[in-house]
Amino acid sequence: MSGKRKQLDERRSELVAAARAVAMSDGLEQLTGRKVAAKAGLSSGLVFFHFETREALLEAVLDSLIEDIFGGLTTPEGAGTPEQRLLSFLQQRFERLRTERRQVELFIDFWVLGLRNASIRKRIRAGLERYRDAVRPVGDELARTRSGLTGDGLAQLAVSFILGSALQFAMEPGRPDPEALVGSVRGLLFPQGKKA
C-alpha cells in the first residue's frame, strides 16, 4: 500500500471513529460533518472529502458498528454438548449487551433508520445474516438430535431472542437478567428437568 493511500485510509478510519463517537453521544440525528470534524480535530472539508454525503458517513459508521457486533462472531466450539455451547454463546451475548448499552442503542437507531432507508436496511440485513451464520453450526448439531428442529430455525430463534433482549436492555437497563434469560432458554431446551 502506498504511503499516500495508507494516510487516506488512516484519516478515513479516524473520521469514522469520530463520527461513531458523536453518534453514540448525541444520536444519529445530531451527526453532522461539523461535529465529526470537531471531534476529530479536523476541518469539515476533510470530512466531506472522505465522505461525499452524510449518508456515506452514516453507512461507514454502521459498517464499523456491524463489524464490532458481528465480526468474528462464532458459537463456542470444543468441549460440551451443542446445548451447552449454545447456552454459553447466549450468555456471552447477553453479558455484552449489558456492558455495551450505548452501542446497542446506536444499533437500534440505525435499525429505525433502516426502516425507511434501503441502503441502511441492506447493511443491517447482511449483519443479521452474519449473526445467524455464527449460530447455525450449533443449531445444525442440535437439529440432528431433536425432531422438528432445523439449524436455520434455531439460528433465527437465537438471533431474535438476542435482539429482543437488546431492546429490553436499551429501554430498561436494569431489568433484563442474563442469568434468567439463559435459564429460560435452558428450560426450553431441556424440558422435564434435564440438565445441560
Image (spheres, rainbow, N blue to C red):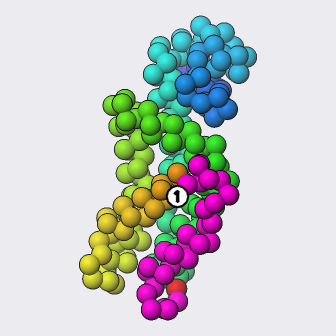
Residue located at (54% from left, 31% from top): 61
Residue that sits furthest to the right in the current view: 41
Q: Residue at x 59, y 72 (%)?
A: 180
Dot 1 amino acid type: Ser
In the rendered image, residue 29, in percent from the top left (x then y), is placed at 55, 25
- Residue 112 spot, x, y in % from top left: 44, 37
88, above or below 167, in the image: below
In the image, is 32 to the left or to the right of 130? right
Asked if 133 appears above or below 50 in the picture, the reply is below
Residue 88 point in image, percent of width and height: 56, 72
63 over 39 or under it: above or below: below
Q: Quadrant of residue 183?
A: bottom right
The front one of 60 and 111 is 111
**Residue carrying label 1:** 165
Residue at image coords 38%, 44%? 126
All told, the count of numbered labels is: 1
Q: Nearer the viewer, residue 179 or 48?
A: 179
For residue 181, what is the image quadrant?
bottom right
10 Å neighbourhood of mark 1: few (<14), some, or many (≥20)? Answer: many
**188 magenta-colored:** yes
Q: Position of residue 171 (x, y in %)?
A: 59, 49
Q: Work out whether residue 110 can be spotted.
A: yes
Q: From what the image shows, is residue 56 above or below residue 104?
A: above
* The residue stretch that appears in magenta: 168-195
- Asked whether 29 or 94 is in front, the reply is 29
